[in-house]
Amino acid sequence: MSVTAEIKFNCPVCKKDLSVQVERMKVIRAERNPVPIVVTHGQPEHALTLFIDKEFRLRATSGSDIVQRVQDAELKRRPFVKRFVPFPKAENVSLGGLDYTQITIVALADGKRSIEELAEILEIPEMRVKIVCEQLVRLGKLDSVRVVME
């Protein structure tokens, strides 16, 4: 008797006829019957669970694109990005004595928009917005500029 048994099956995901070599002792010694055997194959890669009984007959197959979903999730994963976000005061603040840029920043600061986003809206350099925000904090017109990790 050979060490492995060939199991032929049709992949429910890609519809291809395939075969896999399964260690006989793995099936014979398994506590469960039928024995679940997981294999991956294909492009995009996907996973299958083959259920093989103690006589090495295929009882069922179950397919999943979980491998592809994991790869997709890894591609979407971004490293943390440090953003500087100006936070408004809880109470209304006087806008007297402020220039147009300062007033606009106070009006747009909502604790969600970053300095980078404000610079894009105002069409001015990001460093200028950062400096103005720090000035507005010192003047008591903004609560703070906080670092937010996303």
Image (tube, grey):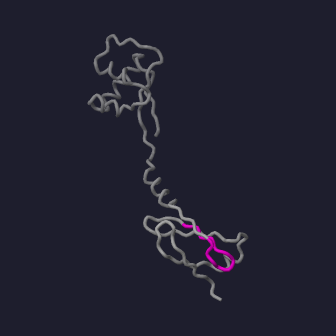
* Residue ID at (43%, 50%): 76
Tally of numbered discs? 0
Q: In the image shown, does 67 or 60 lie closer to the viewer?
A: 60
* Residue ID at (58%, 69%): 61
Residue sitting farthest toward the left: 123
* Residue ID at (46%, 40%): 150
Q: In the image shown, does 17 or 95 lie closer to the viewer?
A: 17
Range of magenta residues: 48-59
Occupied quadrant, residue 53: bottom right
Residue 49 on the magenta segment: yes
Residue 17 on the magenta segment: no
Viewed as shown, does residue 95 lie left or right of 17? left
Q: In the image shown, does 36 or 122 lie closer to the viewer?
A: 36
Which image quarter holds the N terminus? Answer: bottom right
User: Does residue 93 lie above or below 49 as drawn?
Assistant: above
Q: Position of residue 69 (x, y in %)?
A: 48, 56
Viewed as shown, does residue 48 lie left or right of 129? right
